[in-house]
Image (cartoon, helix red, strand yellow):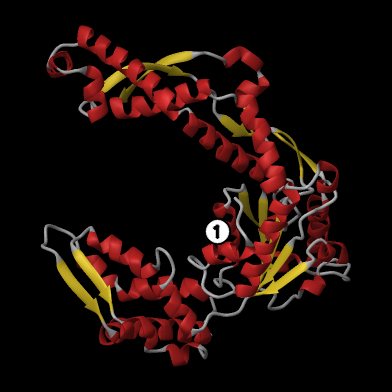
Amino acid sequence: MDLSPKQIVHRLDKYIIGQDEAKKAVAIALRNRYRRAQLPAEIREEITPKNIIMKGPTGVGKTEIARRLAKLVKAPFVKVEATKYTEVGYVGKDVEGMIRDLAECAYRLVKAEKEEEVKAKATSIAEKRLVQVLAEAKKDEKGNLAQEVFESNLLDGLRKGEFDNFVIEMEVLDAPQSMELVPGGAAISIGSIFGDMFQGRKKKRRFTVREAFQIALSEESDKLVDEDAIKSEAIFRAENDGIVFIDEIDKIAGKGNNHGADVSREGVQRDILPIVEGSTVVTKYGPLKTDFILFIAAGAFHVASVEDLIPELQGRFPVSVELNSLTKEDFVRILTETENSLTFQYGKLLSVDNIDLRFDEGAIERIAEVSVELNLTSEDIGARRLHTVMEYLLEDISFNAGGDYPMFTLNIDRKYVDEHLQKLTGDRNLKKYIL
């Protein structure tokens, strides 16, 4: 997608409030990918992404910025926790697993795109297949099903959903399930081990027509797309567009000591290093080069600092940005300006039970104030605190709602907030003294 850095930041503003420095850094990194793609191949090979480290407390938008960035350009994206690689005895996941996960994500993205391209044709074939099965049911069965099928246009009835809940018997491919042979490794299909032994095997199973249609559509789509082309495109997309977000990297920071956990931490850093520097990882879709993947690392860095990472790893993350703790004004904007904000989500949820939920300005301000106070007097969990506050605020109405009641308008004002958040705010001044 040909977006300027300013346009990228504008798109991110819909979902993340503040943190302009971080948004600017990722926008530049994304635009540089586009610029690189326009260059001749010999120059393109020399230009690698400038990886980013984000520093800031939890809940301020680090992961969301990376996730929304990937979604914006439909790039393969995986999030991993650096602490997964530090389990006792160093039997955590293999660090190459993050790249295999990226390949899997890229494969699913490309396959979904290719299936969308052939959806019309696959739907037509699947419909004909279901009509044949229904016609057989008409011949073989008696009673209401046979009568209904006989009297209606099968294809028209199928499209209108008239047969959705009828149970039919249909032949489907007996595909072997994938399984993980090595903990943390790639999932391997039994079919890939024993060759063509399982290819083309079918078995009869019973489904409702609705379920049968989805299975038939999936099978026909698979026949129409080129599996090898999907794998090749997936590897290309992962290599050139992939984004890997390594969270809690501060938890593996530690150097200069030759004992205890620091040895394990530094060992993990050295294992991650070749992946970030550029290496080739074998995946079930083919070898994948990591040279041009964009790596974004993040951590709170309350105790450790970026300088506590080994110099080689620091050098591979030349861009460092700091994200700030959220203020009351930030919380107000999160509740009112972001797309699909929490107030919007709860409004939609309760509208199912005929409750028209409305928040006035005083209520929004008070919710923001309470969230900031709780973050100050207990653990600072950023915007995640809003989930706690909103659940307590709407607990009574959520519990009592339901049933065949007429539409009811509930106006949430400052007084309502104070009354329903009493158990959260009442003892907040004592919390800091309780062990």
Q: Is residue 36 left or right of residue 210?
A: right
- Picture quadrant of residue 318: bottom right
Q: Position of residue 348 (x, y in %)?
A: 29, 61
User: Foreground: 210 or 319?
Assistant: 319
Q: Compared with residue 227, is residue 69 higher up or lower down, i.e. above or below? A: below
Q: Secondary structure at mark 1?
A: helix
Residue plotted at (23% across, 29% down): 160
Residue plotted at (19% across, 18% down): 153
Amino acid carrying label 1: it is: Arg
- Picture quadrant of residue 203: top left
For this orientation, the residue located farthest to the top is 139
Q: Please name the residue that numbered disc 1 is placed on.
A: 68
Q: Is residue 276 left or right of residue 77?
A: right
Q: Is residue 392 left or right of residue 54?
A: left
Q: Position of residue 383 (x, y in %)?
A: 49, 73
User: Foreground: 376 or 351?
Assistant: 351
Q: Position of residue 104 (x, y in %)?
A: 62, 40
Q: Is residue 237 left or right of residue 144?
A: right
Would you call the spot at circle 1 few (<14 residues within 10 Å), some (14-19), or many (20 or more)? some
Q: Is residue 164 visible?
A: no
Q: Position of residue 3 (x, y in %)?
A: 60, 57
